[in-house]
């Protein structure tokens, strides 16, 4: 199961009326479990919306159907963001990634002294939409970002993964080395995983 399937589902939902998971499974010749997996990812990314869909004219609670989020909401922001990202010269990516991380960090925790509490930094990352957790390990702790707020953009623009690395440092005071990124192994790995090192 890869992200190309999610793109196909999203493109189909943009041109079709709201579809149930069963209807999508039939259209794409997938199992219901596969479709629910992809829909969950698309819901987490904010690319699709769950809506009510009444089956026939019978009584009872309406079932759930899915539709693409209309342009002008998150998708419009994503289009604009992608256009800006394409303007970054490859030679300047590291510098700009650092500047973006500093800007985000200052907006997230402008009054606090960041870098002294790993848990405080993880809490800030979660408020930013990363669903972050950390695990103690014998050598270095691991940080897991279980939801990337801009996962689909990161596929085309890996500079955003550099922003994550710098943002982790800005908010926690720990250097982060990526071990596994969602965008490289979506089927098996449910999180971006970083090894943390104190400066």
Image (tube, rainbow, N blue to C red):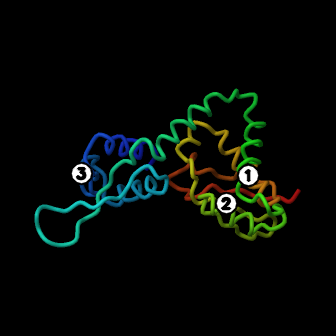
Picture coordinates of residue 136, whole percent (x, y): 75, 71
Q: Give above or below for 47 relative to 36.
A: above
Q: What whole-number distance in Å separates the C-alpha atoms at marks 1 and 2?
A: 9 Å
Residue behind mark 1: 167
First-in-chain label (3 vs 1) = 3
125 with respect to 149 (left or right): right
How dense is the environment of label 2, judged by Cα within 10 Å: few (below 14), some, or many (20 and up)?
many
First-in-chain label (1 vs 2) = 2
Q: What whole-number distance in Å separates the C-alpha atoms at marks 3 and 1?
A: 42 Å
How dense is the environment of label 1, judged by Cα within 10 Å: few (below 14), some, or many (20 and up)?
many
Residue 120 picture quarter: bottom right
Quadrant including the C terminus: bottom right
Residue drawn at 74 percent across, 47 percent down? 103
Check if mark 3's residue and mark 2's residue have beta carbons within 8 Å: no
Q: Residue furthest right?
A: 199
Residue drawn at 69 percent across, 63 percent down? 124
Residue drawn at 64 percent across, 63 percent down? 132
> Which numbered marker is on residue 26?
3
Residue 192 picture quarter: bottom right
First-in-chain label (3 vs 2) = 3
Dot 3: what SS? Answer: helix
Q: Give above or below for 92 relative to 8.
A: above
Dot 1: what SS? Answer: helix
Q: Residue furthest front?
A: 111
Residue behind mark 2: 125
Check if mark 1's residue and mark 2's residue have beta carbons within 8 Å: yes
Q: Nearer the viewer, residue 129 or 194?
A: 129
Picture coordinates of residue 96, whole percent (x, y): 74, 37
């Amino acid at each position: 199961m890869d992200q190309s399937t999610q793109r196909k589902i999203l493109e189909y939902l943009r041109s079709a009326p709201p579809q149930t998971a069963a209807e999508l499974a039939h259209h794409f010749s997938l199992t219901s479990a596969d479709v629910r997996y992809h829909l969950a990812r698309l819901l987490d990314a904010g690319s699709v919306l769950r809506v009510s869909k009444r089956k026939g004219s019978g009584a009872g609670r309406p079932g759930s159907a899915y539709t693409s989020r209309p342009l002008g909401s998150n998708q419009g922001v994503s289009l604009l963001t992608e256009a800006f990202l394409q303007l970054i010269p490859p030679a300047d990516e590291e510098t700009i990634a650092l500047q973006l991380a500093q800007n985000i960090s200052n907006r997230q925790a402008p009054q606090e002294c960041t870098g002294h509490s790993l848990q405080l930094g993880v809490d800030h990352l979660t408020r930013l939409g990363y669903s972050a957790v950390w695990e103690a390990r014998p050598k270095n702790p691991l940080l897991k970002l279980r939801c990337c707020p801009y996962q689909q953009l990161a596929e085309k623009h890996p500079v955003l993964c550099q922003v994550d690395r710098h943002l982790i440092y800005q908010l926690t005071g720990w250097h982060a080395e990526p071990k596994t990124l969602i965008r490289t192994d979506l089927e098996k790995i449910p999180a971006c995983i970083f090894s943390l090192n104190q400066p």
